[in-house]
Image (cartoon, rainbow, N blue to C red):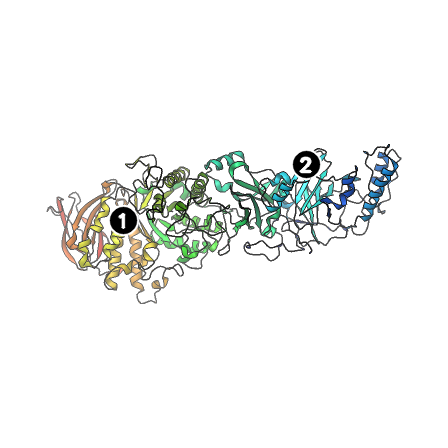
Amino acid sequence: MTPRPTPASGGDAPRPTRRTSSPTEAPAPPARLPVPGSEPVPDPVTEAVAETAVPPGPRKRPKAVGTTAGKPKAATAAADSPRPATVPAAGPKTSTAKAARAKAAGAKAAPAAPAGAQAAPPKAERPKAVKKAAKETAKETVRKTAKKSAAKAPTRAKPVKPRAVKPKDDQVSPAGPVAPAPAGDLAVLPAAPLSPDDRGRLLHGAHHAPHDLLGAHPVPGGVSFRVLRPHARAVAVLAPGLRVPLLDEGDGLFSGVLPLPDVPAYRLRVTYDDNEIDVDDPYRFLPSLGDLDLHLIGEGRHEELWKVLGAQPMTLQDVAGTRFSVWAPNARGVRVVGDFNYWDGAGCPMRSLGGTGVWELFLPGVREGALYKFQITRPDGSHTMRADPMARQAEVPPANASVVTSSRHVWQDAAWMASRAARPVHEAPLSVYEVHLPSWRPGLTYRQLAEQLPTYVADLGFTHVELMPVAEHPFGGSWGYQVTGFYAPTSRMGTPDDFRFLVDSLHRAGIGVIMDWVPAHFPRDDWALAEFDGRPLYEHEDPLKSAHPDWGTLEFDYGRTEVRNFLVANATYWCEEFHIDGLRVDAVASMLYLDYSREEGQWVPNAHGGRENLDAVAFLQEMNATVYRRNPGVVTIAEESTAWDGVTRATHHMGPGGFGGLGFGLKWNMGWMHDSLDYVSKEPVHRKYHHHEMTFSMVYAYSENYVLPISHDEVVHGKRSLVSKMPGDWWQQRATHRAYLGFMWAHPGKQLLFMGQEFAQGAEWSEAHGPDWWLLDPSYGAEADHRGVRDLVRDLNTVYGATPALWERDTVPEGFAWVAGDAAEDNVFAFLRHDAAGNPLLAVSHFSPVVRPAYTLGVPDDVPAWVEVLNTDAAGYGGGGVHNPEPLKPESHPSHGRPASISLTLPPLATVWLRPA
């Protein structure tokens, strides 16, 4: 069968129609195709050769050298006799060459032939090592053998011009154009053969040091070259003034020893069935990872891990290409495969860098946009194709190859970045709009979202958006919470730079960006992280600690320093490379407890006999400390649903349980969310029996720094949308929805609202179609009802941002005081909020469907009058318009333990905010 060419690493010249992703089994490369990005060989008929007359007619191609009993056929004479095999140097031999040989023999040199004369045919020379005292029979045998070899040497046929474009300037080796060889013959001696073990491991992809076997190495008597080019017919070494074919060792290996004083700056000319290509040898480059990088990786302390692992486009020794590196300590060998080598990695084995478990290879000519994977030889000798854990871009799912990329985005948010750390987040306004990007406006790209999302969010007055996970994930139905590409924004909506553009646009609109981050678990896909190098690596080796019981996924091994480094660096990667302003960490409770969702006998206690996952605690502390140290102004937020002590306490402050704080900036208040939603879902007549559910949150309100979340989790899977949770008819549902939002915005803590709830969408959220925007279409009959709720949200955010009493002292008791916390019979909750200067705001929520005129509330006696600043029953919001139009002056009648009181009208199912006149 005719062998087919496997091209070397290349760039962006025309390729054949290629797969969009890697195959399960790499196909044999197609025949008669040049390597993408390789340099085409000029037609020798028209090639201009300086200082040497070129005979007319085509040069003939040397036949691929076969083997006999492990020796190259063409080198048989050299192997069996004391004289070396000789190979004609680049360019035809001239009379000048003959004169040089005659002079070396002590004879008079012949005059040079006229220009254009036919050069003498090749002929083997006798080496000087043959002594004059040798027997004539031995001389005659050697002479006949040499003549016979020269007579059998095939003529070189004119090669077919390769179908490749002219190489770009940065693809040309520093060696420059190949000049003609000096006149005369250059001896090519066979290189020392590889040991059977080295040869077998190299060809099987199980060698830890392929650079020791391949490339150019000084040896006694010259420089040894060895090249692995499967499917090639011949390989020649190209250097200034030199072009020398190597000897064929079989199995795609070509080698030879050239009598050179030093290793030259060289390239390779690889001959396939009908074309030739010039390429740089990947095995002539030293490692580009330094000792400090490897030391930090080994210790699990490399805070910029994304800069040393993965695929990094770079230039080494003036050669453009891509460095590939991957952590796979259990692998017997690793090879790079991709569309640049037709998914056949036989010619691209990587080297192991010491005891760090890191494998590295620089491939010249591989450019941005190239698809790649790692072919890993497992400890049992089998192979697996894996996406790069550190890939910064991936194919659009369901394809799963990694993509070589680098950023060219120019940030324009310097003003935002400089000011975001001006005020601690728990002392600043924070009103968050939660968004699932793929379904907010289905079908939009990152750049199209950048035209619409910032305008919409800024118009509603939210200070931040929170993006559900944007890291690459194979299954859209997971909403991004089963991540396979932790360093790659999902390519469903564009490139990493497109995502940067979206973040930049939000910042320029004055909107901060929080991102959901999922370090708790990862899916079991056999092309991703699970048993990455043939053994548990990112997951714990103990199944009782690795298998997540709820989601069928795997939990990270937080006790392994390299795994912890992978995650800590990932957290700061999003903040530094994408200017993310906050990380909301998903499923923290599942990380903290060894017995989370596990029955007796399904978990192993920690070293102290407890249920706390000490490794996860240490990881979260390190992550938070690193993020806050490296990224001023960023906030981390924990989705933690238990009573774990010190979630938002500093890591160096010890708590009563003996643990330092986890170091988060904020924590979702899941208790408030569940209790308050349970209360408002009850019929008004029954609410007095659940009054405590609305007040209990203030018992623990200052134990942590809280966010009050109405998130995506509360409006899916049969839980109904927010407005649909409310009892009563449509008017009562909308009224209770508005009253609840007013209560939420006034309660201590920051607030988060999921998309669609800002305009009272009646249906549950679905990632398939997103919010029901048609409800805001003016042609829809009930459009005013939904637009009224959205107008309320806009006004809530406007008043909230302008009223420090609602956010400045969220985390200290001095910022809150009950006025009426026990009015269960009336379904009334009234409290005061204070800013740092003591200025108050009075919030009153009434969850009964009746009007309560002349309702008395105690107030401070140092405020001369109170005026309404917001009323959720306003007609513009779709309410009944019951309000207090005039300023309310306190009377000197004590009430609710205060020296003065006011009498006001409470609208039905409404929240009213009042401030000093």
Q: Earlier in the sequence, mark 2 or mark 1?
A: 2
Question: The disc labelled 1 sits on which kind of residue?
Answer: Gly
Pick whichever, 736 or 517, lies toward us.
517
Q: Label 2 neighbourhood size at 10 Å, few (<14), some (14-19), many (20+)?
A: some
Q: Which residue is mark 2?
A: 263
From the image, tell me which residue sits under label 1. Answer: 671
In screen coordinates, is 727 left or right of 274?
Answer: left
Type of amino acid at the residue the image marks with label 2: Val
Regarding mark 1 in the picture, which secondary structure is present there? helix
In this rendering, would 310 be left or right of 110?
left
Which secondary structure lies at badge 2? Answer: loop
Residue 240 horizontal/vertical position (percent):
71, 40
With respect to residue 854, does 133 lie above or below? Answer: above
Residue name at image x 29 percent, y 36 percent? 655
Along the line of sight, the residue nearer the viewer: 333 or 752: 333
In-front residue for pair 823/843? 823
